[in-house]
Image (tube, helix red, strand yellow):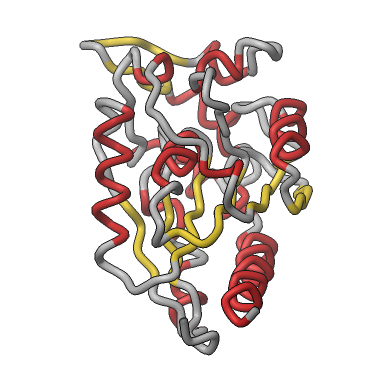
Amino acid sequence: MNSKIKPSIVFVHGIWADGSSFSKVIPHLQADGHEVIAAQYGLDTLAGDVAAVKGTLARVGGPVILVGHSYGGTVITAAGTDPRVAGLIYIAALAPDADETSQSQQAKFPVTDVFAHIEVTDGRVWMKPSGIECFAGDLTPQEQRLVWATHAAPAADLFNQKVEGTAWRSKPNWYIVATQDRTVQPELERFLAKRMHAGTFEIDSSHVPMLSQPDLVLDVIHKAASAVQKNMAA
């Protein structure tokens, strides 16, 4: 491979925040010469979401760095086994091992505040307006309202589903821990980062650091991209 080619960046969203949650970092990466795309999928089944991400990989050139937020970490853990993927970045994300689900990881840690502000209706898990403070408490009130208005509700059984593939066991990986997270336990994030032997960065942020502290998230992505390029040249 040509080591001068910058890795493409594929963003993989979680629940309650779709691909638009990366809007503050995408333009900067594009200006820096990266091909960038945010995968969008239905949160109906884990297998369907993984397939959608693998399909998105074909829309950009390789090598690719997958960036997964929250539940998106579960998705990139499976989708990242694709040979086009050269690295993984987890943002306040889940990262299951082969015998785990999204839910089983979280069950080992205390329930976070946001789950007192949900409603299951028509088979989907919706966040009540009162939950946005737990999800994105360090955004402005206007930004919080926008995130809630565009939030993506998952199927009620999504977090209990499994798909084969544990990419972090074989691919370089980085982890951003959101130390003020009230959606995914920061202690869980630190545990997962340590288990993966990830390059770890702690950010004083809510669950959405790519919106509240985009410059710091960009710095991590640039570090990962540089490392992938060096690996290509080796």
The residue drawn where x is 34% and y is 74% is 61
**Quarter of the figure that contains the C terminus:** bottom right
Residue 17, image x, y percentages? 41, 40
The residue drawn where x is 34% and y is 13% is 157
Residue that protrudes farthest toward the front in the picture: 234
Residue 132, image x, y percentages? 51, 31
The residue drawn where x is 61% and y is 10% is 107
Determine which quarter of the picture holds residue 115: top right
| 79 is higher (above) or lower (below) than 162 | below
For residue 141, side relative to residue 149 (left or right): right
Residue that protrudes farthest toward the left in the picture: 122
The residue drawn where x is 57% and y is 54% is 210
Residue closest to the eye, 17 or 197: 197
| 103 is higher (above) or lower (below) than 93 | above
Residue closest to the eye, 2 or 138: 2
Determine which quarter of the picture holds residue 63: bottom left
| 76 is higher (above) or lower (below) than 127 | below
**Figure label count:** 0
Residue 90, image x, y percentages? 59, 46
Residue 217, image x, y percentages? 64, 60
